[in-house]
Image: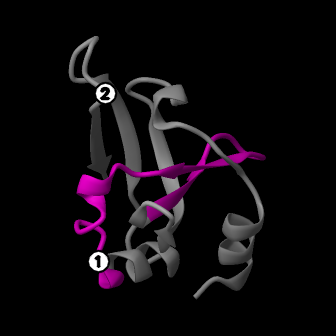
Amino acid sequence: MDLSKNFYAVASGNVVRISTLEVDRRYPIIFAQHLETQFGPSVLLTLQVDSENSAKVFLPKCYTEVFRDEGIENINDGTKFYHLVYRGRKSSGDRSYILSLEY
């Protein structure tokens, strides 16, 4: 496990809304974690925004079960490297996000 990478991911970055991410941009995921929030279980991702900045985003609840412990460990120890891509909303009145996970 890369301790400095994990420390940086936890200690830095502002929490932002997914809708503030740039559409169709590939954001490298540098850290992932399961959290228990006041609204129930959730997944918090730390994304690399540029060479000096990161941002944290809470994924919609429907993705909580997708990110299992093994997948999170693989991301955090550098075994797997993924990008989160925000594709926009399903429709103008819909609050649902379209997301993809790419290598």
Asked if residue 72 can be seen in this view, the reply is: yes
Three-letter amino acid code of the residue under disc 2:
Arg
Which labelled disc corresponds to residue 95? 2
- The residue at the far front in this view is 38
* Location of residue 85 (image quadrant): top left
Q: Cα distance, mark 2 to mark 1? A: 25 Å
* 26 relative to 57 in the view: left or right: left
- The residue at the far bottom in this view is 1
Image position, residue 61 (x, y; %): 31, 55
* Location of residue 80 (image quadrant): bottom left
Q: Which residue range is magenta in the image?
A: 43-70
Give the mark nearer the N terminus: 2 vs 1: 1
Task: Determine whether 91 is above or below 65 in the image.
Answer: above
Image position, residue 64 (x, y; %): 30, 64
Three-letter amino acid code of the residue under disc 1:
Arg
Task: Determine whether 95 is above or below 67 in the image.
Answer: above
The crowd level at tag 1 (other Cα within 10 Å; few <14, some 14-19, many 20+) is few
